[in-house]
Image (cartoon, rainbow, N blue to C red):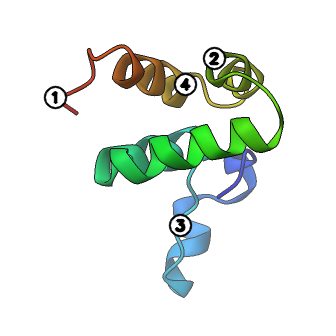
Amino acid sequence: MTFNLRDFRHEDTSPWGVVAIHPDDFLVLLMRQNPVVVMATLRAQAALRRRGFEAFLEIMEKSAPQFVALALSIQSGRGSAL
């Protein structure tokens, strides 16, 4: 997982069986695989940092905008059809 996908092209990583993935894409993948666990983990992380859920997601939004949008959608009840 890296923000620097430019230096980890598929043709360079595939001989080792490695796939580079952007953190936003990785988090979306995790959310789609197990939204209950990911949402519980987000809530726990927010609580540990003494932040509200939405405030915690605001911090993540710059790095993982698709993931944050999905988490907010699930939180509001609109993301049931992942």
Amino acid type of the residue tagged 1 in the rendering: Ala
Q: Is residue 77 above or below residue 8?
A: above
Whichever of callouts 2 and 4 sits on the residue coming sooner in the sequence is 2
* Residue under label 1: 81
Q: Secondary structure at mark 1?
A: loop
Whichever of callouts 3 and 1 sits on the residue coming sooner in the sequence is 3
Q: Are marks 3 and 1 in contact (CB under 8 Å)?
A: no
Q: Nearer the viewer, mark 3 or mark 4?
A: 4
Q: Nearer the viewer, mark 2 or mark 1?
A: 2
Whichever of callouts 4 and 1 sits on the residue coming sooner in the sequence is 4
Q: Residue at x 47, y 40 (%)?
A: 39
**In the orientation shown, which residue stands out farthest toward the left?**
81
Q: Secondary structure at mark 4?
A: helix
Q: Are marks 3 and 4 in contact (CB under 8 Å)?
A: no
Spatial CA span between label 2 and label 1: 21 Å
* Residue under label 4: 68
Task: Give residue 11's mark.
Answer: 3
Depth check, front residue: 32 or 42? 42
Q: Is residue 44 above or below residue 9?
A: above
The image shows residue 51 at horizontal and vertical percentages of 78, 26
Q: Secondary structure at mark 3?
A: helix
Local packing at callout 1 (Cα closer than 10 Å; few below 14, some 14-19, many 20+) is few
Q: Nearer the viewer, mark 3 or mark 2?
A: 2
Q: Nearer the viewer, mark 2 or mark 4?
A: 2
Spatial CA span between label 2 and label 4: 9 Å
Spatial CA span between label 3 and label 4: 30 Å
Spatial CA span between label 3 and label 2: 39 Å
Task: Give residue 54's mark.
Answer: 2
Q: Are marks 2 and 4 in contact (CB under 8 Å)?
A: no
Spatial CA span between label 3 and label 1: 34 Å
Whichever of callouts 3 and 4 sits on the residue coming sooner in the sequence is 3
